Image: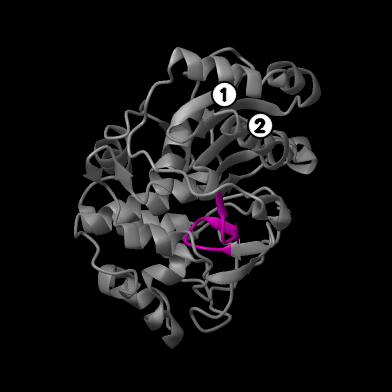
Amino acid sequence: MRAAVLSFSLCLFAATSALAQTAFSWRDSTADEQRLDAIAFEGFDKGIAEGMGDVQSVVVVLQGRTVYQYYRDGNPDTLRDMQSVTKSALAVLMGIAMQRAQITSLDQRVLDLMPQWQSLNADPRAQAITLRHLLSMTSGFAVQDATGIAPPLPPAQAWARPLRGQPGQLFAYDNSMPVMVGAILEKVTGRSYVDYASEHLVKPLGMKEPSYARGLVSMRTIDMARLGQLVLQDGRWGNEVLLPPSFVADMVKPHSAGGPPAGLPYGLFWWVPSGTTYFASGYAGQLVMVHPPLDLVIAVTSTVSVGSQERGQATRLARGRLFKAAQKRLEMK
């Protein structure tokens, strides 16, 4: 994944309201709610259209319902390139596999699941690498990719790389990690990850079928927000438990202090800048930000370009004006 460099101000998220009652289903808004939503987000369409040219779409979900949407192309059904938000979606699929008892523990050794990789790496430290190490980017492989844009290797080649440290000790952002995790998921489930995602994530959440290319996923912005809402709800959707709540808690807590490209604490394929916020991030301004104290999910997509990456408009919009508008909306009750 190529993550946008994000510098979240922790103080911004410190002053929040009490935890809202979580709704475990996606609900429609009443006419009165829509009227108040429009007041809280007045002027946003024009501000984004004229002042944030990189931003292509926005969805804000507050207490289980959509309170604001923006689409530069006017089409909410467009599948949008998520870039490295794909990693976070893959972590969710691993949680689904745990809920379905296809994976018993994140502390399982990779080589117990993929014995065909045994002969590919002679370094004895490779014997100790676990699923947790892959998902937390602390496997110990030698990686030189401070920008987070290196192309991924095929899974066998990724496993054969030299190690620079003991597993669990050093964070190194590595675009080959999800390739290996995807191969493991397919091995333990006996399904392609595309088919597995369709049956156990896309359909239960009422998503439109994503598209897949070059190891990345394109999804509707509303479905990116649904992904964040599922995590916000501790893996519950409606009356179903899709992920173990304990896995979700593990996924969105820091497993290391992190490092480049975002320079923030890292969980399991999710960035965790504070105890009250976590997010999935992709290169050039693809973002799913979750803030449980407000029961808030913000999904943003942007033009995939070097300029968009450098300007960081999506991050500023999400942590600034959108966040404040959500606070205002809650105060209007």
Q: Amino acid at mark 2?
A: Ala
Provide the residue designation for mark 1. 68
Viewer-proximal residue among 48 and 301: 48
Question: Could you say where residue 82 lies in the image, as x and y percent from the top left?
Answer: 54, 37
Provide the residue designation for mark 2. 325
Judging from the image, what secondary structure is the residue with disc 2 in? helix
Q: Quadrant of residue 333?
A: top right
Mark 2 vs mark 1, foreground winner is: 2
Question: Could you say where residue 250 lies in the image, as x and y percent from the top left?
Answer: 42, 64
Q: Quick one: label 2, few (<14), some, or many (20+) residues within 10 Å?
A: some
Viewer-proximal residue among 163 and 109: 109
- Which residue is at a point 60% across and 20% down the rendered structure image? 70
Tell me which segment is drawn in magenta: 266-279
Instruction: Please tell me whether residue 182 is drawn above or below residue 218 in the rendered image.
Output: below
- Which residue is at a point 58% across and 80% down the rendered structure image? 164
Relative side of 87 to 230, left or right: right
The alpha-carbon separation of the residues under discs 2 and 1 comes to 10 Å
Q: Is residue 317 visible?
A: yes
Q: Quadrant of residue 122?
A: bottom left
- Which residue is at a point 60% across and 38% down the rendered structure image? 286
Relative side of 305 to 209, left or right: right
Q: Earlier in the sequence, mark 2 or mark 1?
A: 1
